[in-house]
């Protein structure tokens, strides 16, 4: 997660705020592996966008806490 801090430190030039980083990397970092779900059903595909919002929001909250100095 240190790289997130380094990228966000240059937000004025790269426009990658903590929120933007969360939207891009949240689904990748917080998704369940394919072995966890197996073959996806139509219901799971429909839920996908909602899961992305939750994953992005969760990562954003974690990054905000880290930026505020919270130790994990």
Image: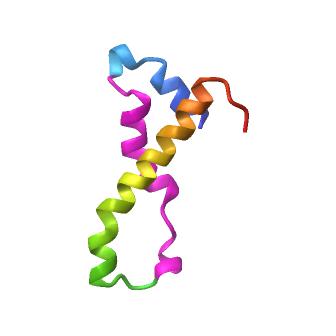
At x 66%, y 24%, the residue is: 69
Q: Position of residue 52 (x, y in %)?
A: 37, 56
* Residue toward you, 1 or 43: 43
Query: Please, which residue is most extreme toward the right here?
Result: 71
Q: Position of residue 22 (x, y in %)?
A: 43, 41
Q: Considering only vertical position in the picture, is 45 above or below 71? A: below
* Residue toward you, 2 or 43: 43
Q: Quadrant of the C terminus?
A: top right
User: How was the colour assigned to the protein in this rendering?
Assistant: rainbow
Residue 7 belongs to the span the image colors magenta: no
At x 32%, y 23%, the residue is: 15
Query: Residue 3 occupies which quadrant of the picture?
Result: top right
Query: In the image, which residues are magenta?
Result: 15-37
At x 30%, y 61%, the residue is: 49
Q: Is 31 positioned to the left or the right of 12 in the image?
A: right
Q: Position of residue 45 (x, y in %)?
A: 29, 74
Q: Is 12 positioned to the left or the right of 66 in the image?
A: left
Q: Quadrant of the N terminus?
A: top right
Residue 24 belongs to the span the image colors magenta: yes
Say how many tags the image has: 0
Query: Please, which residue is most extreme toward the top here?
Result: 12
Q: Considering only vertical position in the picture, is 42 above or below 47? A: below
At x 58%, y 25%, the residue is: 67
Q: Position of residue 35 (x, y in %)?
A: 52, 79
Could you tell me what secondary structure mostly forms the magenta stretch? Answer: helix
Q: Considering only vertical position in the picture, is 43 above or below 18? A: below
């Amino acid at each position: 997660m240190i790289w997130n801090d380094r990228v966000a430190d240059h937000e004025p030039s790269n426009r990658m705020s903590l929120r933007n980083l969360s939207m891009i990397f949240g689904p990748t970092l917080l998704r369940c592996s394919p072995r966890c779900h197996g073959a996806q059903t139509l219901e799971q595909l429909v839920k996908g966008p909602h899961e992305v919002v939750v994953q992005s929001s969760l990562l954003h909250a974690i990054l905000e806490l880290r930026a505020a100095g919270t130790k994990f």
